Structures are given as C-alpha cells and as structure tokens.
Image (cartoon, helix red, strand yellow):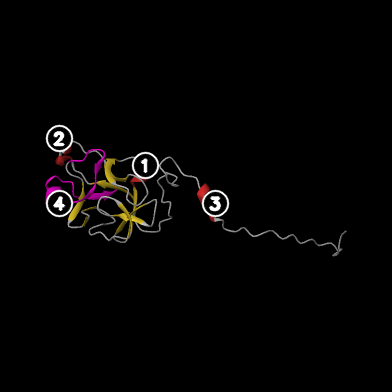
Amino acid sequence: YEGDDCCDVVVEMPATLYDPAQEKDKTVDEEGDDDDDDDDDDDNGEGGKTGRLRMYCENKFRWQEKDTCKDWCLEAKSCSSGAGLEIQKCSGSSKQKWKKDGNVLRPACSSKLCVANGELKSDSISLEGLSSGGNFEITKFGGCMTQSHHPRSNEPVSFRDCAKARRTNTNRWEWK
C-alpha cells in the first residue's frame, strides 16, 4: 500500500568467505599453469619487464653455418623449483615468459621462483647485467648465462665460461 511503512523487509546476504579448498579446483592449462597464454602482462605490470628472453643474434654470427638467425628463447621445463632451463625456438609457450624483478629473473608463472644455475629455485638470486632493453650479458656464479655452443633445441642453459660463450657469440640476450 502506498505510503505504508509497515512492511519493510530486510534481507541479509551471507558474506562470501575465502575457501582455500577452492584453490585446488583452479583451472590449469596443458602447460601446468594458470596463464591464459595471451601474451599480455598477466601480473598487470608488477615486477618490472615481462616477456621472452631471446638469445641475441646477428646474421654474421653464422650459427649452425646458417646465414640467418633463428629466434632461440630461454624456456623452463616446468613452473616448479628444480625445473631445468633450456634453449628452445621462440614460441607462444608460457614456459618462455619471464619477468625482471630488480636484478632477479623470474618465470612469469611464479613470483617465488627465480633463475639459478641451470634451474629454477625458490629464492631471489640477484644476477648481474640483467637489463630492461637492448642486448645484454647475464652473469653469475663466475660465468655467463648460455648453453654449450651454437644453439639447438633442448640444450641446457646454465652459467658457463664467459670466454667460450663470447667466442661463439652465445653470451648475449634481449627481450622479445
């Protein structure tokens, strides 16, 4: 009835509480992570530079005796502590997405993991030379981040002798 205040009804809705059990049901893609693989910055820009780390190449390097450079990117075998690092042809895989967190290089899938000597670790290991632009040499543990010679798929990446890496022109990286 118009103007009648006798029947106001108040409905209380229960508050939605965080349930940690729901985390186990989180959607995971075929690569074992929750990244949507759309190549945008899933962490909304937090943590610094994000993208693929490509081995810097010039045609004059003649890797594998070829006149042109292929794109070779750093890839983690999985998004877990102890996962190996390797060189792979650059692709749309989320395993090739990295973020620069100060001088720490982290896989885009986790802000708790970082690049260590040939693997991911649950740590914050500071690297030398990690830059946000241009091409750069990443060093730590007395060596340069590289693989053993001109790049080929599946080769392990770790910190190795810089003199050899410089001779084979496999000592420099760039963001892609």
Region in magenta: 150-176
Can you give x and y, in whole percent of width and height, for residue 65 in the image?
14, 35
Q: Amino acid at mark 4?
A: Asp
Q: Nearer the viewer, mark 1 or mark 2?
A: 1
Precedes in sequence: disc 2 or disc 4: 2
Upstream in the sequence, badge 1 or badge 2?
2
The residue under the point 45% across, 45% down is: 36
* Few, some or many residues within 10 Å of mark 2 (<14, 14–19, 20+): few
Q: Residues within 10 Å of mark 1 (few under 14, many from 20)?
A: some
Q: Find numbered disc 1 in the image and state the secondary structure of the residue it sits on.
A: loop
C-alpha span from label 3 to label 4: 47 Å
**Disc marking residue 93:** 1
Q: CA distance from mark 3 to mark 1?
A: 26 Å
On the picture, is 28 further left or further right than 142? right
CA–CA distance between discs 2 and 4? 22 Å
Give neighbour class at mark 4: few <14, some 14-19, many 20+ (Cα, 10 Å).
Answer: some
Residue 44 pos. (x, y %): 43, 55
Q: Which residue is mark 4?
A: 161
Under mark 3, the amino acid is Gln
Contact between marks 3 and 1 (CB within 8 A): the answer is no
What kind of element bears circle 3? Answer: helix
Cα separation, mark 1 vs mark 2, equals 27 Å
Task: For the residues labelled 2 and 4, say whether their Cβ atoms are less than 8 Å apart.
Answer: no
**Residue linked to disc 2:** 65
Mark 3 or mark 4: which is in front? 3
Outermost residue toward the top in this view:
66
Mark 1–mark 4 distance (CA, rounded to whole Å): 29 Å
Q: Which residue is mark 3?
A: 22
Q: Is residue 66 above or below residue 140?
A: above
* Three-letter amino acid code of the residue under disc 2: Glu
As drawn, the label of residue 142 is none
